[in-house]
Image (spheres, helix red, strand yellow):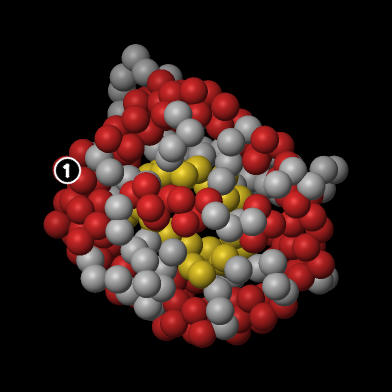
Amino acid sequence: MDRRELLAGLRALPMRNRIITALDVPTPAEAYDIAKRLGPDGRFVKVGLELFSATGPAIIAGLSALGKEIFLDLKYHDIPNTVASAARVAAQLGVAMCTVHAAAGRTAMTAAATALATAPPGPLGRRPALLAVTVLTSLSDPELHEVSPSPDQVQDRVDRLARLAWDCGCDGLVCSAADLSRLRAVVGNEPLVVTPGIRPRGGATDDQQRVATAGEAVAAGADYLVVGRPITRSADPGESLAALADELTAID
Ligand code: C5P
């Protein structure tokens, strides 16, 4: 499936169904409990390093059996052959989206994009979208310069890696709401943008430094939102998700 067709399909869903609940929990029991309580708006869930390390691919099959689509956020960063092979396995698991570090380089990103474009359709009937992570939002300028000295500031590097990722055939980017408007100006409207750091207005920010409401993020150009604790730590995850989804329906 080519990139244009895949992205059109992902953008055809109503905004209220484009919230990805981050299942950042250490056991399958907790993950399934939250997934079951999400209600009809909760079509997408994120499986990250913690849950995947605890469970392996069985969690993908289990959540898929509950009707969930999976954002597998393992942020591949390795040599091209390994990154491409991992992406191919993700396609066979039937995940909707997976992630690669743009810092893995042109050859690795191109290899992953090619592996996905040529993989046989998995259980979803379409290939996963490949999303690039540019610079981790947890990295400050001094810390980035410590690992990789350069006159570039973090923002310059984000912009350069975003352009490179799109050129290499990635389908989109993971990007904070704070950087979204600038990044859209750099890469245009075609790349799919998935945005974390979402909080209800006046809600706890937890350890996130820069947050936006769901409405603000979508107005700035986000296609999908990743929301963790405001949903997963709430007494009623289904109700919390529905409240965020209502905010998006208003601007759909
Ligand atoms: O609980 P909270 O809503 O802060 O969770 C946000 C989710 O988005 C977490 O799974 C986190 O790993 C992810 N994320 C992020 N910032 C990034 C990339 C991913 O918060 N830059």
Q: Which residue is mark 1?
A: 107
Kind of residue sitting beneath label 1: Thr
x 53%, y 63%: residue: 46
Locate residue 107 relative to residue 248 in the image: left or right: left
Image height of 241 relative to 212, above or below: below
Image height of 97 relative to 137, above or below: below
Q: Position of residue 38 (x, y in %)?
A: 70, 72
On the image, which quarter does residue 102 sit in? top left
On the image, which quarter does residue 240 sit in? bottom right
Of all residues shown, which one is farthest toward the top? 151
Image height of 221 relative to 151, above or below: below
x 34%, y 14%: residue: 151
Number of numbered labels in the structure image: 1
Locate residue 217 relative to residue 4 in the image: left or right: right
Query: Callout 1: helix, strand or loop?
Result: helix
Q: Is mark 1 within 8 Å of ligand 1?
A: no
Front residue of 164 and 57: 164
Q: Position of residue 9 (x, y in %)?
A: 47, 56
Q: Position of residue 161 (x, y in %)?
A: 34, 32
Circle 1 crowding by C-alpha within 10 Å: few under 14, some 14–19, many from 20: some
Q: Position of residue 11 (x, y in %)?
A: 53, 51
Q: Is residue 183 visible?
A: no
Image height of 64 relative to 75, above or below: below
Front residue of 123 and 110: 123
